[in-house]
Image (cartoon, coloured by chain):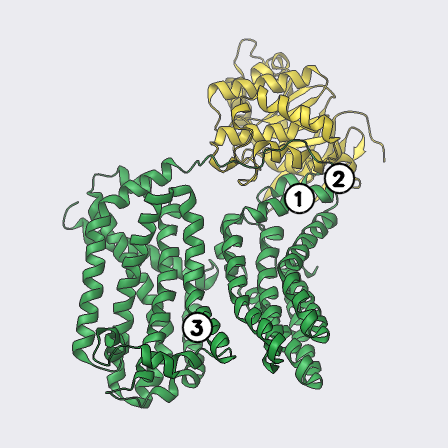
Amino acid sequence: MKLQESALQVRGLTKRFDRLAVDALDLTVRSGEFYALVGPNGAGKTTTLRMVAGLSRPDAGSVAIFGIDALSHPVAAKQMMAWVSDEPMIYDKLTPLEYLEFVAGLWGVDPAVSQASAHDLLASLGLEPHLHERCEGFSKGMRQKVALAGALVHDPRLIILDEPLTGLDAVSARHVKGLLADRVRAGCTVIMTTHILEVAERMADRIGVIARGRLVAEGTLAELRQQNGHNDTSLEDLFIALVDVEAAAA
Amino acid sequence: MSSTALPWFARHEIRLASREWLAMMTGGRRKRNRAVIGLIVFAAVMHLPAYAVVGRFADLTAPLDKSSLIVITATIFLAWALMLSQAIESVTRVFYARADLDLIMSSPVRLENVFSIRIAAIALSVIAMALLLSTPFVDVLVIGGGIRWLAAYGVVVAIGLSAAAVAIAVTIVLFRLIGPSRTRLVAQILAAIIGAGFVIALQVAAILSYGTLSRFAVLTSDAAAAFAPDPESIVWWPARAALGDGEALLLLLAFGLILLGAVMAMFSPRFADTAVSVSANAAPSRQGFRTTAFRGGSRQQALRRKEFVLLRRDPWLVSQTLMQLLYLVPPALMLWRSFSDSSAAIVLITPVIVMAAGQLAGGLAWLTISGEDAADLVATAPLPASRVIRAKIEVVLMAIGTIFAPMVLALVFASPLQAAVTVAGVLIAAASATAIQLWFRVQAKRSQFRRRQTSSRFATFAEAFCSIGWAATAALALAVPIVALLTGLMTAAILVATWKISPQRE
């Protein structure tokens, strides 16, 4: 079933655990866009993105990845995207190169292409001296970089990142931000949740503010300011104002 | 550390140990009453096999002949070896898995005192477990032979103290000799070998000398009696102490206490250094294979390759496989002997192989199916979940095939029919254990392997009963085929019942 052509189109997405986590959420992310999803703890950001990545099934609603219905054709949708969580998903007993070889194999990438790509990615993330060391000895930041390299090695069209900068030092964070910006310039779409509002403010083309499982505001920083009548406010002040309004309304 | 802080820390250690033990018994759920009732029932039931094993020794009185002394001493030594194995495992766990080391070491206390208490806590937990397991046996001896057998509890305490002391010394020496990154693996392998080694060595000696699997054949032989020291020798103190000799018991307890005290005095200051070196070396830079070129193939092949690499590099699996292979040494020797004398005892090889295959397959299946460290990565990969599971099951069966194929091939030359029955038994036992792990799978980290049983006690028992059932069926298929049909149906019924109540049924 072909839906509207956009990187991500979510309609009426709903998920309930012991409480309503995501409440009939509508969200559209354009192709080639850097989209930041911000919101307070427990707002439903991670739950939303896990449903988009196929890690959790929604109670209701639809998810389309580049026009492909991700709920009825999950394999085709997954072929085009990568998921990076705040807890790096790597194997302690594999080396970074072995890990990337495995990920490339899972996505069916030509080994000649993926090998060159793996070396480039690991070098650009400063992991070249550790190519043949097992990941069991790596710091959180190094593990996060290996996970990110794994997400990029199959050249996804859509990258979904859940708090990717958690635990990274300033240098590593800059490496990661640079790599993501390069990907967006090359036409890739990035959706990222973050608590670091400065990152969202600087890097994102558009920002979505989510609270209580609903999208309460969306747009460029200028649009968000305009919507709230504060032309010279920082994103932090805007965010607090939006979340406070939502909490008061509940 | 102030004088009031020491008892406080001891209470803290005991509380942690008791909660850890309770969590293991109840699978992390709050079912304390059920755990206690279950334990009492288990202890009561254990008196029956205990009676079968030691009931005939209850009437033994001093002075004993050499054969009796050898059997009792060997039994005590076996218990000591098992305690040592458990203690090595506990000490290693304290170094690598206790998350409170940073807190303790950054607090304003004397580390020697704190670690002395921690060493004592290890000794206490080893002794408590040994007392629990030995209670049915000692009870049977007391009921049958009088209260003098209560001294056996004292022997358990004494050998527990010395086992804990030796375990701590061995582990810390290992740290010094080979470093923290290798100690964990070596200690696990050492624990496995020590636990099984003594029994297997006796079996090997029995087979080579007498053509039987019975360990008692060696212990009660004239040759053993001829080589054994005089009945007055200190070698027999543990046996004499167990029989109620108060002097021997006191000396044994004093020896255990002095040994543990010496280890505490010698190693408590180094305990802190060792703990620091573990945390500093929590990042060992072990090399993987130097990949020359990425390999192609299907997505399932990529999954299988990854699983095989992880299994090869898994310390638990290395130690467990080694132990299974050790257990297979006696039947292998039987097989070798049977080529020359056509011994009927060769039939015993089949259930041993089938049982080992079932047990190993259960562990392998948990590691590959439940112990997926990058579950989200695999779940977001573009291939259906059914193909992921299939690839993982294939890995289990291929690994089992690789481990047991040489033995079965050797069996073909001795008895083709037995080889065929063994192959069928291995396949069915491995498939059953894998299926049970699949039905009861709970996503976990590979490092949680030690606690895999706590996720479902039912699955653990079902896996064990199925392995035993298929092993018995395979043996009976060779000896009394009609009865094998019955045991086969019973084991299949266990499997069906397990599936019926499994959470993955839907």
Please rate how many residues cluster around mark 2, counting C-alpha atoms within 10 Å: few if below 14, some from 14 to 19, many from 20: few
Classify mark 3: helix, strand or loop: helix
Task: Please provide percent x and percent y for residue B11.
Answer: 25, 56
Instruction: State whether discs 2 and 1 lie on one chain.
Output: yes
Please name the amino acid that badge 1 sits on: Arg
Classify mark 1: helix, strand or loop: helix
**Residue B305 shows which numbered tag?**
1
Q: Earlier in the sequence, mark 2 or mark 1?
A: 2
Labelled pair 1, 3 in contact (Cβ < 8 Å) = no
Mark 3, residue position:
B202
Q: Residue at x 53, y 32 (%)?
A: A143
User: Which chain shows up in green?
Assistant: B
The CA span between labels 2 and 1 is 10 Å
Q: Earlier in the sequence, mark 1 or mark 3?
A: 3
Query: Residue placed farthest to the right in the image?
Result: A1
Please rate how many residues cluster around mark 3, counting C-alpha atoms within 10 Å: few if below 14, some from 14 to 19, many from 20: many
Mark 2, residue position:
B297
Labelled pair 2, 1 in contact (Cβ < 8 Å) = yes
**Residue B314 sits above or below residue B436 on the image:** above
Task: Please provide percent x and percent y for residue A29.
Answer: 71, 24
Q: Check the picture and name the quadrant holding the C terminus of chain B.
A: bottom right
Q: Residue at x 24, y 53 (%)?
A: B117
Please name the amino acid that badge 3 sits on: Leu
Relative side of B117 to A194, left or right: left
- Which corner quadrant of the image does residue B403 belong to? bottom right
Q: Residue at x 21, y 73 (%)?
A: B234
The CA span between labels 1 and 3 is 39 Å
**Residue B119 shows which numbered tag?**
none
